[in-house]
Image (cartoon, helix red, strand yellow):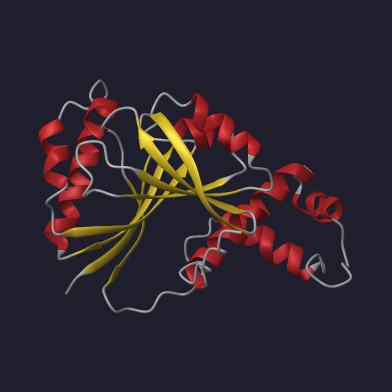
Amino acid sequence: MGLVAEYEIPCEQLPLVDVAAAVPDATLVVEIQFNHGERPPFLVYATHDAHAPIERALADSAFVDAYALVGQAGETRRYQVRPAVGMEAQLGNHLDDLDGLRALATAEAIVERIRVTPDGWVQTGWFADRAAFDEFRTFWLRNDAFRLRRLTHDGEPEAPGDGLTDRQREALRTAYEMGYFEIPRGASLDAVAAELGITASALSERLRRAQTELIETTVGSTWPPLPADG
């Protein structure tokens, strides 16, 4: 039976980690178009209340040769990013095992989702069996680090929001219980933050990341059609 895994690869040299670090309150999800040669384009789904900081970070990134906005839905913008270098060149000075990196491209696995954080990547993948999963796990343990978040058998149900951190879950629960999500609101952001003992800005970021995770694990696959030009 196949496996489904969510895991962290804390490696600051991975593509676009510098963009996530420059705009830490944004949510960046990428897809890699591997069938486009040695420097495959990246599709970047960037969620933030302002697009200018993200576009500045893309322009400043050494990994990015050029980028283009190709669609928008609410606060999420979709960019096509053309890399200035391939994955091997990007990681070559950091990884000793480039042959192992190439081998991952032919492993019996599909990386379904990549979320870029200021520390590295969080990936969700489907693996044919335990051996295929161990190939990924051991490669990143040898070369950097690997932290498993969730591992289930293919076909086992997952509760929405399983990817939430304990702090995100606590923030959502406290905000809900205090009436922050009611209309009209029963509690202010400042009041919820005081209850949790954190700043309002920290709470705002935590709630945004938690809500993004819930959306991605429930309705994220129903991306709306792009509006027609004109």
Viewer-side residue, 217 vs 85: 85
In this rendering, does residue 22 appear at all?
Answer: no
Viewer-side residue, 1 vs 106: 106
How many numbered marks does the figure carry? Answer: 0
Does 69 appear above or below 67?
A: below
Tell me the quarter of the picture where residue 181 sits: bottom right
In this picture, residue 49 sits left or right of residue 66: right
Query: In this view, which residue lies farthest toward the front?
Result: 230
In this picture, residue 40 sits left or right of residue 190: left
Viewer-side residue, 135 vs 226: 226
Query: In this view, which residue lies farthest toward the top?
Result: 93
Does 104 appear above or below 18?
A: below
Could you say where residue 49 lies in the image, as x and y percent from the top left? 69, 48
Q: Quadrant of the N terminus?
A: bottom left
The residue located at (13%, 59%) in the rendering is 108
Tell me the quarter of the picture where residue 95 sits: top left
Does 10 appear above or below 211?
A: above
In this rendering, does residue 56 appear at all?
Answer: yes
Q: Quadrant of the C terminus?
A: bottom right
Does 178 appear above or below 70?
A: below
The residue located at (85%, 73%) in the rendering is 183
In this picture, residue 199 sits left or right of residue 39: right
Could you say where residue 82 lies in the image, as x and y percent from the top left? 37, 36
The residue located at (75%, 43%) in the rendering is 201
Could you say where residue 66 lies in the image, as x and y percent from the top left? 43, 32
In this picture, residue 38 sits left or right of residue 30: left
Could you say where residue 128 lies in the image, as x and y percent from the top left? 16, 66
